[in-house]
Amino acid sequence: MTRTPETIAEAVAPGYEFEGTALELGGLMLDATQLSDVRIRIPLGMLNRHGLVAGATGTGKTKTLQLLAEQLSTHGVPVFAADIKGDLSGLSAAGEPGEKISSRAASVGQEWTATGFPVEYYALGGQGTGIPLRVSMTSFGPMLLSKVLGLNDTQESSLGLIFHYADKAGLPLLDLADLRAVVGFLTSDEGRADLKSLGGLSSATAGVILRELIAFEDQGADAFFGEPEFESKDLLQTTADGKGLISLVELPNLQDRPAIFSTFLMWLLADLFHDLPEIGDVDRPKLVFFFDEAHLLFKDASDAFLDQIAQTVRLIRSKGVGVFFVTQSPTDVPDDVLAQLGSRVQHQLRAHTPNDAKALRQTVDTYPKSAYDDLGEVITSLGIGEAVVTVMNERGAPTPVAWTRLRAPESLMGPADPVEMQRTVEASPRFATYSQVVDRDSAHEKLAARLEDGARKAAEDAEAKERARDVKVERSRKPAPKADDSIVMDVVKSGAFKDFMRTAAREIARGMFKSGRR
């Protein structure tokens, strides 16, 4: 049955009438040109049921994220977001009015006011403008590191054995140098016995891991690991006037090391899950976490890693944390994770290739039944700043699918002034906590000291053997000992010897001269 604009509005409107506080997304579109007065919203208390913002490049995903972050902050909810291109830094500055903004605001019934919001800037390892974010190697763990290094299942298991060995041997793994030192030790002559005792770790696999670590360090990844380690609870900040603090983290040159960025965000989410107490369902979330470029997290991930993500997303809801994945297509997200995302904001998808068409069909299949005759056609015809929306209502049921023109952000839609950003960074009380690297004794230093002690002992043993050999050689060169002169003299001076000599002399003389008695 063909739906008229009036019947679409009648079918959609009741689904977005909520009793509690809600974030305003925009107005319901009846077709490509007609806009209704139906307001499309998300209940604030349901944002810990997670969500997805998807769409092709340039369709407005970043502006949607900005719109959500502004309203969350206004309602006192802290926000964490990855700022891939630096555009979100403009959240700290008031927006610039213009004809386009005025027109859009008027069309969706928005009273637009230029407003800046409280922002904290972070940078992974201090690379970029922001408070340095670091994590110790032990906290990061072998599973996430295996994802970053691109290790297979066998190598991942072996890396786990190395972490286990370091823990049992009292060798703290704080940075890449520590892990390299431990692997280097296990593959050396000195550590061969320890390597053999690990059982499941071969020297060949250890060698592969060591080479991957060296390549990883050459990419500059050593800056991300170390101390002081970031305390994830520092994200749960509000200002004196009750606004939620928006924490933005950037990584320049993402294309050079995309895996570490996504896995670092996953570590941060897992750390929040570990540290935060259970609070159940609340009127508003304690934090909303926007996971940008989410496809990088799931690409080439092991089954164990995907299971860990799904479990974290499923359970962190009870800690009061909402997670929004931001990516190009819903098919980038595994089914086990996608099934847990209660709110969906789908920007335009393109269907220029057979793979695109397949992804579009799969996307349409994930939506509840809609009032639109051809939802796939709606998704491909969406304009910039438009989206197909469905959210979880206050009863936990999905709302009707709504073609929505989104509101305009009230902060600056673009990068903030770098000078102001640096000023904000240095004024933060957390800058003093995290700005300076702490380099305490860890596995690298302990193994170096152990090897130095071993080398010194070996040198001392070699020197002792050399001295013993020299003494032996010296003794072998001395002449055989002569008879004692004192004994000879005693014999010569004795009376018997003198009588003997006189008698002998007489006999000799007689023989020589042929004289003597006859």
Image: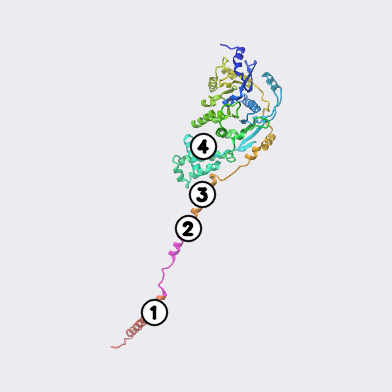
- Residue depth check, mark 4 versus mark 1: number of the one nearer the observer: 4
Please identify the dominant SS of the magenta region: helix
In the image, 441 versus 187, the foreground residue is: 441
Residue bearing mark 3: 451
- Where disc 3 sits, the SS reads helix
Which amino acid, mark 3? Leu
The first of marks 2 and 1 along the sequence is 2
> In the picture, residue 232 is in which quadrant?
top right
Residue bearing mark 1: 492
For marks 2 and 4, give the CA distance: 44 Å
In the image, 252 versus 14, the foreground residue is: 14
For marks 4 and 1, give the CA distance: 92 Å
Question: Furthest residue to the bottom?
Answer: 517
Q: Residue at x 66, y 25 (%)?
A: 409
As displayed, is residue 105 above or below residue 179? above
The first of marks 1 and 3 along the sequence is 3
Where residue 183 appears, x then y in whole percent? 50, 42
Which amino acid, mark 1? Val
Residue bearing mark 2: 464
- Residue depth check, mark 1 versus mark 3: number of the one nearer the observer: 3
- Where disc 4 sits, the SS reads helix
As displayed, is residue 431 above or below residue 363? below
For marks 1 and 3, give the CA distance: 68 Å
Q: Which quadrant does the N terminus fall into?
A: top right
